[in-house]
Image (tube, grey):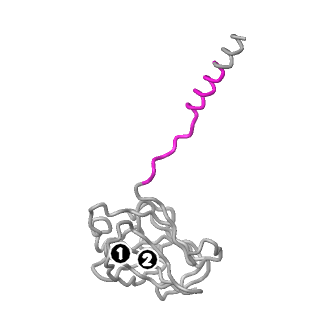
Amino acid sequence: MKKAFLSIAIFTIVLMSSAEVTAQKFAKVDVSPMDAASFPNNWKESNKLVKIIYSRPQLKGRTLDKLAPIDKVWRTGANEAAEITFYKDVTFGGKEVKAGTYTLFTIPTEGDWTVILSNQKNIWGAYFYDMKEDVVRVNGKMSKSEDSIESFSIVFEGEEESAMMYLGWANTIISVPVKG
């Protein structure tokens, strides 16, 4: 009986130690977590007009122009450049855009921002941004928020086939109309 118990105990210890050795190593939580915004934004509505996947950097005591420099192409978020998908042909900022997935870049300024849709895909940051890949450049109208927005955020608001995309960070809000 003692031999059987000892054998089971050794077998259990071997199993547990091998599980520890082969266990998956998970990465720590990203400091700029990935998020998505879509229109319609109701999760029950599967017939979307647009969806954007982006990462959400935080101010953490820094200024907006330190993180999204004035007059320089910005990835519109953190980490990988933001990707926007239109599920049907749309007008984006008043310009026609075919259904498809594009990379979203912006050029921050003291006033209205330039918002860019690019054919570049799977790009980290804006380090390899290539103007020759631009699909459209539109004006993103700037307004000010009374409250500071700590984490960069994107949201869509609207009705039926007409939405406004809002990019918000610090006290800056950039808006671009999207119509199906």
Residue 8: image tag: none
Please identify the quarter of the rendering in which residue 87 is found: bottom right
Q: Please identify the residue farthest to the top as the structure is shown.
A: 2
Start-end of magenta stretch = 10-30
Quadrant occupied by the N terminus: top right
Disc 2 vs disc 1: Cβ atoms closer than 8 Å? yes
Could you tell me which secondary element the residue under label 2 belongs to?
strand
| Separation of residues labelled 2 and 1 (CA atoms) | 8 Å
Quadrant occupied by the C terminus: bottom right
Image point (42%, 64%), residue name: 56
Report crowding for label 2: few under 14, some 14 to 19, many 20 or more residues within 10 A (C-alpha).
Answer: many
Amino acid type, callout 1: Ile
**Label 2 belongs to which residue?**
116
Could you tell me which secondary element the residue under label 1 belongs to?
strand
Image point (26%, 67%), residue name: 63
* Magenta segment includes 28: yes
Residue 107: image tag: 1
Name the one closer to the observer, 133 or 180: 180
Residue 135: x %, y % from top left: 49, 78
